[in-house]
Amino acid sequence: MARISASVYTSHVPAIGAALDMGKTQEPYWQPLFAGYDYSKQWMKQNTPDVIFLVFNDHATAFSLDMIPTFAIGTAAQYTPADEGWGPRPVPVVQGHPELAAHIAQSVIQQDFDLTIVNKMDVDHGLTVPLSLMCGQPQAWPCPVIPFAVNVVQYPVPSGQRCFNLGKAIANAVQTFDADLNVHIWGTGGMSHQLQGPRAGLINKQFDNAFLDRLIADPAGLAKMPHIDYVREAGSEGIELVMWLIARGAMSDISGGKAPEVKHRFYHVPASNTAVGHLILENV
Ligand code: DHB
Ligand code: FE
């Protein structure tokens, strides 16, 4: 049977991708940020999964405002890095896992979550920057990836509670896949940031660190936080953090198992306009 062995949480910022792609990681501005992922790259090498289930948000790249799925699962064999205005990032094409993705779609839809099936999609910085942070600059990504896109761009967005419940349903789905696969689930986006309006540039370190504390120790309580609190406290783009609750909801302790082990925790400001947070949790 397939199993989820770990969850990874990390912010995404387009400028992080650009810093990597342009060889600027050792510049004074970026060095402390990338240093926070040294352990993570090592950990990924030692704990390479068979598949990554990568929860991310598209930024009006694959989905224009013409059509906006709340939850969309990628069932394709591969996904091309998107052109977000400066040409596609020079990173490998993402290989999918159509069999596991189709099984998860079947199971999660039968558990009463409405997923959109996506057979063709270009993936933007929301997906490629977390892969770069965790894997560096390889010739090929270390394993197949199932992209799972959540709408946090156009209101209404899903609640933290719904994301948390969905994570639990995804874990059920993975457990019923009839192959011995080691799966990681990643929650990406956040932390506090606001890119627009009078509060542009907002960062809230206190909120972010409390969010990390609660994500580890009180995820069910954290899931109850209404979306307006994310916007007030973490800024309009801070709402991306609800995606972390999908990954956290898929961990064993939520379904009666033991509390996960915290393998790594990192927080850094600034990275462009965004506070960067990062956690690695392992099921024990
Ligand atoms: C920035 C952050 C984001 O999450 C994003 O999607 C785009 C830009 C930024 O900080 O610049
Ligand atoms: Fe974003």
Image: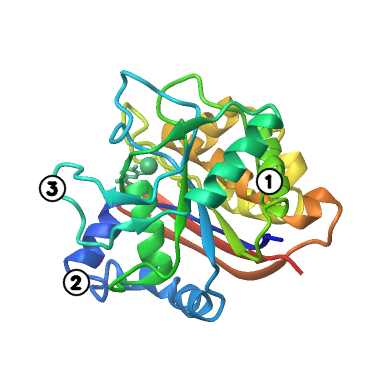
Counting residues from the start of the chain, the first of labels 3 and 1 encountered is 3
* Residue ID for mark 2: 23
SS at badge 1: helix
* Residue ID for mark 3: 86
Against 229, residue 33 (above or below) is below
Q: Amino acid at mark 2?
A: Gly
Q: Nearer the viewer, mark 2 or mark 1?
A: 1
Counting residues from the start of the chain, the first of labels 2 and 1 encountered is 2
Q: Residue 249 location in percent, x, y?
A: 69, 46
Residue located farthest toward the left when viewing the structure as drawn: 86
SS at badge 3: loop
SS at badge 2: loop
- Horizontal side of 222 relative to 95 (left or right) equals right
The Cα atoms of the two marked residues, 3 and 1, are separated by 38 Å
Q: Between residue 102 and residue 56, name the one nearer to us.
A: 102
| Residue shown at the point (37%, 67%) measured from the top left | 141
Q: Amino acid at mark 1?
A: Ala
| Residue shown at the point (68%, 32%) measured from the top left | 161
Q: Is mark 2 within 8 Å of ligand 1?
A: no
**Residue 205 can be seen in this image:** no
How busy is the neighbourhood of tag 1: few (under 14 within 10 Å), some, or many (20 plus)?
A: many
Q: Residue 107 location in percent, x, y?
A: 67, 38
